[in-house]
Image (cartoon, rainbow, N blue to C red):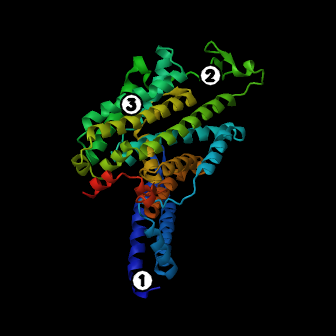
Amino acid sequence: METNRLPALFKQALLTFTVSLILFGPISGLVLEGFSFRNELTRAVLLAALVTAGRVGLSLVGMTSIGKKITAKIGGNAAGVTVMTGTEKSPVLILTLLFIAGLSLPLFADKYFLGIAILALIYCLLGLGLNIVVGLAGLLDLGFVAFYAVGAYLLALGAQYLGLGFWGALVLAPLLAGFCGMILAFPVLKMHGDYLAIVTLGFGEIIRLVLNNWLDFTGGPNGAPVPAPTLLGIEFTRTAKQGGVPLHEYFAIPYSADYKFWFIYIVLFLVVCLVIYAVERLRVMPLGRMWEALREDEIACRSLGVNHVFTKLTAFMLGASTGGLAGVFFAVHQGFVNPTSFTFFESALILAIVVLGGLGSTVGVIAAALVLTILPELLRDFAEYRVLVFGVLMVVMMIWKPRGLVRVKRPAFFPSTKEENRNVPLAVKAEAAQ
């Protein structure tokens, strides 16, 4: 260990302790009790000391030869793209096992865990939709929750005023949400960066305020009920409420409230699989290439003749359609919707899923959605520190994996072989040589 770095290490520890104390002091050092507060600064000092010790420990390890090797290894993996060699094994077997395991989950999970799994899959849908807009097309959208609300309220209000059912909403929600995405996209075609983020944030707040204040139509803060799903006239409730036949009566089996959750989970799981397949196919199609080209350099993209209007519109519309699908499943799962479920925090959480998973990475978005959905449930016993732990993990992730959990993979392109060249006509070869 280098002794000449000890003074700098001491200054770093002092700065870390001071900043940590400033941050933890108001948050955990003052406990509100009615109109007064109780002094708990000892707890803030302990937390600051713990953070300082961890920072000093990391610095000391980084000074050693082993620490330098680890730092170099981590730094070497910071690239955002992995080019495939073409010799990788096919993941068909693993994907098949994951698909079977996912379908069979209701047989082994209880109602509580199945509810968490449904919520995790909903956030997977939301992450996949926003990943098209932010990760692939590079358009920062902070109002994505608006399309989520459109899908949820379409089912709730459609059932109330038009008699719309679950399957009808599942078809119409992507269309309506995509139309709203088109309405949002036209005013922001020439905006970038912070300006685009502010406009999309305003759009999300407009939708929430309309839902909250249009009492006669949406119910306002009181929300709106959502009917239970049905399948070919079979209902999943104890008694028939929509003119069908309850599942347990139709099959002469004992009634269970889990049947509804099983049905929602299986349909949602299949929809998520279809969306994953569609997104992966779009990425390698010309449209997906145009999204990524637009993200990297819009000026160069437009100079090469790419229609930026069409490219941005498709990104916004397809991402919004996926958000509308997620809204339908959220509404039917909760059985009730109100504007408090569609705040800016939801948009921030979805954006965190995309960023932490890796911009443009489908596998990373799915992994981040599962982690950020299940982690709060695992930390429920530490409710006072749950948000703190969540923030610390995000900071660690941004330092350790600034490009996200999973790096984007690109297929390898190889020059044609001699055998392939033999089949090319001579006229074509001559034209290529010129």
Q: Amino acid at mark 1?
A: Leu
Disc 2: CA contacts within 10 A as few (<14), some (14-19) or many (>=20): few
Q: With respect to residue 156, does 132 lie above or below?
A: below
Q: With respect to residue 419, does 110 lie above or below?
A: above
Q: Is residue 35 visible?
A: no
Q: Amino acid at mark 2?
A: Leu
Which image quarter: residue 343?
top left
Residue 316 location in percent, x, y?
35, 37
Q: With respect to residue 71, does 359 lie above or below?
A: above
Q: Is residue 179 left or right of residue 113?
A: left
Q: Which of disc 1 and disc 2 is earlier in sequence? A: 1
- Determine the residue positioned at 32% across, 50% down: 293
Nearer the observer, disc 2 or disc 1? 2
Q: With respect to residue 14, does 310 lie above or below?
A: above
Q: CA distance from mark 1 to mark 3?
A: 58 Å
Which image quarter: residue 421?
bottom left
Q: CA distance from mark 2 to mark 1?
A: 70 Å
Q: Is residue 146 left or right of residue 112?
A: left
Q: Residue at label 1?
A: 6
Disc 1: CA contacts within 10 A as few (<14), some (14-19) or many (>=20): few
- The tally of labels here is 3
Residue 70 location in percent, x, y?
50, 73
Secondary structure under tag 3 reads helix
Badge number at residue 215: none
Find out whether the residues at labels 2 and 3 contact each other: C-beta distance under 8 Å. Answer: no
Badge number at residue 178: 3
Q: Residue at label 2?
A: 231
Residue 180 location in percent, x, y?
35, 29
Disc 3: CA contacts within 10 A as few (<14), some (14-19) or many (>=20): many
